[in-house]
Amino acid sequence: MSDELADFGEFVQASLPGLLRYGHVLTGNPHDAADLVQTVLEKVGSRWAHVQRKTADPLAYVRRAMANAHISRWRRLKRESLVADVPEQRAAAPVDPFEHEPLWQALRELPPRQRAVIVLRYYEGLSEAEIASSLGVSTGTVKSQASKAIATLRTKIGTITGGRDDW
């Protein structure tokens, strides 16, 4: 080995572009190549004195170490199933315990304003005046929407439950 490459820093500076090209050929992309070169140079750098004494060509040693490191990484990742396109996966929606309850099914089918009036009145416990203020409508509109919603719910629940009117 020449005297100008005796120092590890000088070795890296002189051979880095070639090592990055070699890593790119091994890995297939420049980012993985840079990671591979960095990993191998860390290991070689900590043993630089030994590498200089035992090898006639440190560049060949580093290239071989890169090949071995890439093969080891490839073997670890080989267990993964890599695909070109990620399959569409839906996040598991939380299970609604009331999904199949007749009242909730009928409530979902109400028009938005009627549903809002029923929910605000019977779920939130608001008065007709508070509902009217919240929705920006008159108190009479709240009363009429509630009346229509209750009539619709009675009809739908009667249909779903087979005519039993438990209300």
Image: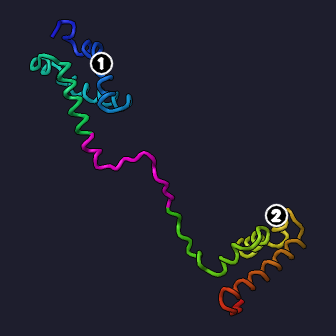
Q: Position of residue 68 (x, y in %)?
A: 20, 33
Residue 1, placed above or below residue 152: above
Instruction: Give the number of marks.
Output: 2
Quadrant of image for the C terminus: bottom right
- Specify the amino acid type for callout 1: Gly
Q: Position of residue 74 (x, y in %)?
A: 27, 40
State how far apart marks 1 and 2 are (Cα): 70 Å
Residue at screen point 28% across, 49% down: 79
In the displayed structure image, the side of residue 112 where residue 48 appears, left or right: left
The reply to whether discs 1 and 2 touch (Cβ–Cβ < 8 Å) is: no
Q: Residue furthest left?
A: 54
Q: Earlier in the sequence, mark 1 or mark 2?
A: 1
**For mark 1, does the 10 Å Cα neighbourhood hold few (<14), some (14 to 19), or many (20 or more) residues?**
few
- Residue closer to the observer: 17 or 45: 17
Q: Position of residue 139 (x, y in %)?
A: 88, 71
- The disc label shown at residue 18, or none: 1
Q: Which residue is mark 2?
A: 135
Colour pattern:
rainbow
Q: Is residue 146 magenta?
A: no
- The disc label shown at residue 145, or none: none
| Range of residues picked out in magenta | 74-91
